[in-house]
């Protein structure tokens, strides 16, 4: 579009005119902003979104609230937008739940069902859904609550807000849960510039007592800590063992540039979080560039038992410049979080929720074959821009091999395994829209353990994103990509021509 503007203002310069002809031809084969509309990732019909907020399952619906600007496609007038789903996959957008009011923006927070009506905010025996959020005004961030007794359709802000005010400008993103052993509500909230997470307790969601602080720890050289989350998970394969996971967003300076998400593993006794790793150990939840401010759903019944997370699939570095319209911002596909014992200690394992299978359409498969033969078959057709791919590649000593997605004359996104570094990666240096930020064109890597030389990749491809779950979910990468509409090729590559395909399954996602 910029090229077109140049063309109009300098029509008489012949050199520029021929450059313009080229640019126009490129622009015509390129995607329109609306072509990037995700098909199975949540995006709002229009306008700006960032962090997921108030994730709660109320017994019949998954609620997804989110940072939302009702008035435009740039950050501002922050409110809580609202969507609901029965299957974490197909979302229905509802009116704004909590709107900015009197210059106070509604920043990130969480939601709980107060089933004992400890807050007294329930009506006629209906337990309230209580949202706990940061109120942001000039130079002040405070914690506030609002409640709903009609499944989140209408909300009342608590008249005696704020419920916590420590006269701080950088104090935000409360996440609240019921702590069964101590029979009280616990809040984790961030002192962003101090790189601390503060824990509070409350009997009724209205009066809060400070308990302890955690931090600084992990990566020190970052501007802020945001969006904390704390939850307990069982350790797979170790009966009776569990750990607490403390998730902390860093707004800038993360592993793949810009925003990213760290986590700490340890214990929480109802008062204090104790990190079981050395204080400077940095664990990243996702090593791509576009997985920020994740939250997990509260209220998922024990019979289901899953810890399900979703993140803003974006990065503060270039979020304002994404080439999409009339919306800007989208969520990652929901994923489960589990803990497993590894030689390095207990680590998170993440995989897409099984609901993805309900989208699987046409199925394609390859078994035990060479890359050359595979490519002869793969090259014969145009592939969908929304796919799930599950592949097992035998590296056979190859240094670098993988799958190239959304391949076209000028583009291609590589998801591969680099044996020299023992990493799985997304290479988006040729994925389109590289001008949105000088750092956008990059390769993002995650260390991965492979078994018997077999690299296991699970890939979710949507119109402007790639999520990779490698090695059974121990390594994850999430990146936005902006190829041209017509880039529909799919192929395998190998720098050493030794790799082969053990299996490849690809589904068009409906
Ligand atoms: C994280 C964040 C939060 C804040 C919100 C404002 O992305 O900066 O800390 O509450 O976005 O929109």
Image (spheres, grey):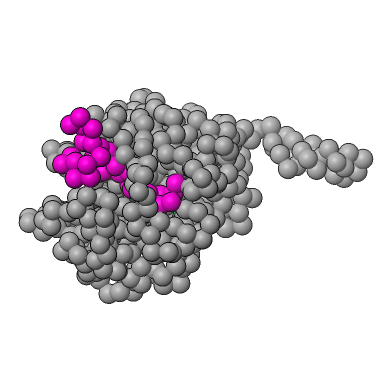
**Quadrant in the rendering for residue 446:** bottom left
State which region is magenta.
Answer: 106-135
Membership of 315 in magenta stretch: no
Q: 74 left or right of 171?
A: right
Asked whether residue 318 appears in the rendered view, the answer is yes
Nearest the eye: 177 or 45: 177
Q: 427 left or right of 158?
A: right
Query: What residue appears at the point 36 percent right and 25 percent down from the top-left corner?
Result: 362
Residue 339 placement (x, y as % from top left):
21, 55
Residue 242 placement (x, y as % from top left):
14, 58
Nearest the eye: 223 or 286: 223
Residue 491 placement (x, y as % from top left):
46, 40
Nearest the eye: 18 or 394: 18
Residue 299 placement (x, y as % from top left):
22, 41
Query: What residue appears at the point 47 percent right and 34 percent down from the top-left corner?
Result: 44
Nearest the eye: 461 or 182: 182
**Quadrant in the rendering for residue 440:** bottom right
In the displayed structure, 381 sits above or below 142; it is above
In the displayed structure, 79 sits above or below 477; it is above
Asked whether residue 427 appears in the rendered view, the answer is no
Query: What residue appears at the point 11 percent right and 56 percent down from the top-left corner?
Result: 181
Q: Where's the C terminus, which quadrant?
A: top left
Query: What residue appears at the point 26 percent right and 68 percent down from the top-left corner?
Result: 212
């Amino acid at each position: 579009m910029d090229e077109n503007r140049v063309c109009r203002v300098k029509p008489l310069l012949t050199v520029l005119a021929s450059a313009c002809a080229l640019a126009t031809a490129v622009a015509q084969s390129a995607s329109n902003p609306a072509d990037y509309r995700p098909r199975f990732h949540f995006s709002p019909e229009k306008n700006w979104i960032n962090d997921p907020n108030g994730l709660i399952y109320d017994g019949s619906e998954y609620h997804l609230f989110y940072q939302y600007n009702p008035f435009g496609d740039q950050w501002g007038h922050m409110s809580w937008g609202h969507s609901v789903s029965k299957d974490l996959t197909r979302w229905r957008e509802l009116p704004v739940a909590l709107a900015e009011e009197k210059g106070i923006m509604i920043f990130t927070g969480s939601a709980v069902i107060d089933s004992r009506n400890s807050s007294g905010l329930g009506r006629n025996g209906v337990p309230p859904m209580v949202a706990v959020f940061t109120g942001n005004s000039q130079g002040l961030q405070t914690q506030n609550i609002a409640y709903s007794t009609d499944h989140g359709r209408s909300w009342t802000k608590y008249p005696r807000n704020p419920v916590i005010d420590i006269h701080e400008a950088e104090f935000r993103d409360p996440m609240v849960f019921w702590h069964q052993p101590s029979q009280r509500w616990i809040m984790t909230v961030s002192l962003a510039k101090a790189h601390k997470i503060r824990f509070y307790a409350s009997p009724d969601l209205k009066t809060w007592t400070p308990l302890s602080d955690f931090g600084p720890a992990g990566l020190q050289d970052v501007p802020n800590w945001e969006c904390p989350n704390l939850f307990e998970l069982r350790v797979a394969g170790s009966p009776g063992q569990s750990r607490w996971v403390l998730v902390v967003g860093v707004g800038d300076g993360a592993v793949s540039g810009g925003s990213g998400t760290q986590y700490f593993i340890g214990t929480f006794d109802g008062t204090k979080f104790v990190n079981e790793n050395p204080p400077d150990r940095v664990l990243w939840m996702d090593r791509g560039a576009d997985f920020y401010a994740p939250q997990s759903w509260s209220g998922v019944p024990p019979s289901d038992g899953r810890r399900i997370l979703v993140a803003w699939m974006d990065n503060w570095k270039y979020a304002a410049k994404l080439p999409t319209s009339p919306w800007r911002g989208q969520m990652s596909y929901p994923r489960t979080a589990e803990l497993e014992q590894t030689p390095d200690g207990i680590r998170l394992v993440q995989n897409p929720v099984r609901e993805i299978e309900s989208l699987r359409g046409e199925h394609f498969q390859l078994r035990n074959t060479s890359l050359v033969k595979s490519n002869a078959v793969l090259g014969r057709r145009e592939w969908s821009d929304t796919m799930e791919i599950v592949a097992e590649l035998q590296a056979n000593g190859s240094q670098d091999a993988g799958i190239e997605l959304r391949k076209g004359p000028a583009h291609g996104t590589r998801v591969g395994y680099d044996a020299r570094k023992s990493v799985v990666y997304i290479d988006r240096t040729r994925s389109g829209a590289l001008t949105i930020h000088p750092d956008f064109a990059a390769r993002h890597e995650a260390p991965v353990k492979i078994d018997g030389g077999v690299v296991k990749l699970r890939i979710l491809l949507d119109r402007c994103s790639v999520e990779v779950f490698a090695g059974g979910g121990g390594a994850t990468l999430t990146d936005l990509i902006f190829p041209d509409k017509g880039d529909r090729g799919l192929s395998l590559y190998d720098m050493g021509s030794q790799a082969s395909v053990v299996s490849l399954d690809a589904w068009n996602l409906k």
